[in-house]
Amino acid sequence: GLENPTSEVLAAWIWQQLKPQLPELTAVMVKETCTAGCVYKG
């Protein structure tokens, strides 16, 4: 779930949803602003 919807938690959740359908997925990027965000690499 997304009880704590930070960009880091959201990126990890998106990864978990997409990785089974996209096995070659290497990263998920979530941007909050032009200069703030995160990259999740599993």
Image (tube, rainbow, N blue to C red):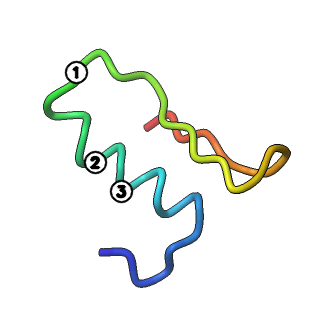
x 43%, y 52%: residue: 12
In this rendering, is residue 39 above or below 12?
above
Instruction: Please give left or right for residue 8 compared with residue 3 in the image.
Output: right
Residue at the disc numbered 2: 16
- Name the amino acid type tagged 3: Trp
Do labels 2 and 3 touch, CB within 8 Å?
yes
x 49%, y 80%: residue: 4
Q: Residues within 10 Å of mark 2 (few under 14, many from 20)?
A: few
Do labels 1 and 3 touch, CB within 8 Å?
no
Task: Determine whether the residue tagged by mark 3 lies in a helix, strand or loop.
Answer: helix
In this rendering, is residue 30 above or below 23?
below
x 14%, y 29%: residue: 21
Q: CA distance from mark 1 to mark 3?
A: 15 Å
Residue at the disc numbered 3: 13
- Quadrant containing the N terminus in the rendered view: bottom left
Give residue 31's position: percent from left, percent from top.
Answer: 66, 47
Residue farthest left in this picture: 21
Do labels 1 and 2 touch, CB within 8 Å?
no
Residue at the disc numbered 1: 23
Which numbered dot is residue 36? Answer: none
Q: Residues within 10 Å of mark 1 (few under 14, many from 20)?
A: few
